[in-house]
Image: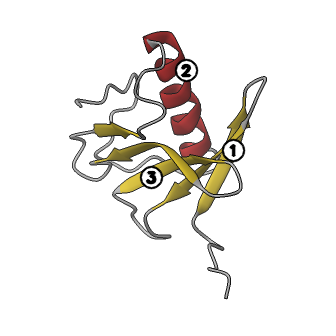
């Protein structure tokens, strides 16, 4: 049986090698999102604390050692995909976002 993820996918972005998908924790007022890649839903990044504004990041095991510049690009791209076509939640900062973690 295949899981139905309809309504929780927020968008995607790509680099020269992969396509990354952004999936929210729930359709209404999500408190976190995941960045996934590959057919097996490899978790690249989880960002939590969206509702509180106390953002925390958790990198998947394979991705932890990647360069800081690449990680910043992934975070920025993920937030763009997360907010694309959606109104930002009131507690989220309206400019630059930094994750504590």
Residue under label 1: 12
* Cα–Cα span, label 2 and label 1: 13 Å
Q: Residue at x 45, y 52 (%)?
A: 33
Classify 72 as above or below 93. Answer: above
Residue at 78% in and 23% down: 16
Judge by depth and name the residue closer to the eye, 84 or 1.
1
Q: CA distance from mark 3 to mark 1?
A: 12 Å
Quarter of the rendering containing residue 32: bottom left
Q: Nearer the viewer, residue 42 or 76?
A: 42
Q: Earlier in the sequence, mark 3 or mark 1?
A: 1
Assign a secondary structure to mark 2.
helix
Quadrant placement of the C terminus: top left
Q: Mark 2 or 3 closer to N-term?
A: 3
- As helix, strand or loop, the secondary structure at mark 1 comes to strand
Residue occupied by mark 3: 33
Q: Nearer the viewer, residue 95 or 19?
A: 19
Horizontal side, residue 68 vs residue 4: left or right: left
Image location (x, y in percent) of residue 88: 45, 46
Q: Name which residue lies at 49% across and 59% down.
A: 24
Give the residue at mark 2.
73
Location of residue 74 by image quarter = top right
Distance between the alpha carbons at the discs numbered 2 and 3: 16 Å
Q: Secondary structure at mark 3?
A: strand
């Amino acid at each position: 049986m295949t899981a139905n993820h309809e309504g929780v996918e927020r968008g995607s972005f790509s680099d020269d090698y992969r396509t990354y998908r952004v999936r929210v924790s729930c359709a209404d007022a999500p408190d976190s999102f995941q960045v996934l890649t590959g057919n097996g839903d490899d978790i690249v990044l989880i960002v939590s604390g969206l509702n509180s504004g106390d953002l925390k990041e958790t990198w998947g095991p394979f991705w932890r050692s990647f360069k800081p510049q690449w990680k910043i690009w992934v975070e920025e791209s993920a937030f763009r995909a997360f907010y694309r076509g959606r109104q930002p939640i009131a507690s989220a900062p309206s400019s630059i976002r930094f994750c504590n973690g």
